[in-house]
Image (cartoon, grey):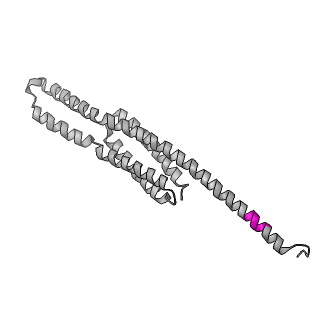
Amino acid sequence: VDPELDVEDSWVQLMDVTDRALQELVRMRELEGETLVKDFRLRLDRVREALSLIEKRAPQRVMEAKDRLRSRVAELLHDTAGMDEERLTLEAAFQAERMDCTEECVRLRSHLDQTESFINFGGPVGRKLNFIAQEMHGEANTIGAKAQDAIIATQVIVLKEEIEILREQVQNVE
């Protein structure tokens, strides 16, 4: 032990250095958090945009499916006059029900709103965001399974890409 070493002075210096290091750590974490929030908002906006395109396209494809069905039935019958319009309407309604992704779109929008609320709230929200990101991914998968449409399928890819990036980023949040 160095007799020239003043323990009390060394202790003060150590506390000063430790305090500055902790302040710097807190500042860096705050900056990282701000950067993550900006990225989250960008991703959420992209998901909302893709979802809007899906919601706009969904009713159109139902009508197109009805027209395709009518055309196929007419080909089979070779006579559109003998076509049972009621049966055609029922079949089209059945197909429309199978293709309907309204519920999934509504739930996905709700998850987006919840994510935004958690981001605005702050605090330790990592687990909640992780759970919501998993739910969003499930909704995107279901929309994709019901798509039966190239335009919607393209937007589902955008949804999945952005949600996957969100899921990865959430791992950096407490």
Q: Which residues are magenta?
A: 13-18
Query: From what the image shows, is residue 37 above or below residue 125?
Result: above
Look at the image and say whether residue 49 sits in the magenta stretch: no
On the image, the x and y values in percent for residue 51 come to 38, 40
Look at the image and say whether residue 15 sits in the magenta stretch: yes
Residue 133 seen in render:
no
Q: Nearer the viewer, residue 159 or 83?
A: 159
Query: From what the image shows, is residue 161 above or below residue 4?
Result: above
Residue 74 seen in render:
yes
Q: Is residue 107 shown left or right of residue 39?
A: left
On the image, the x and y values in percent for residue 16 come to 76, 65
Please tell me in which quadrant of the rendered image residue 55 appears: top left
Q: Residue at x 47, y 47 (%)?
A: 164
Quarter of the image with the C terminus in it: bottom right
Q: Is residue 41 shown left or right of residue 151?
A: right
On the image, the x and y values in percent for residue 159 come to 42, 42
Q: Nearer the viewer, residue 167 or 148?
A: 167
Query: From what the image shows, is residue 20 above or below residue 87?
Result: below
Q: Residue at x 88, y 76 (%)?
A: 1
Residue closest to the far left: 82
Q: Main secondary structure of the magenta part?
A: helix
Query: From what the image shows, is residue 31 above or below residue 148?
Result: below
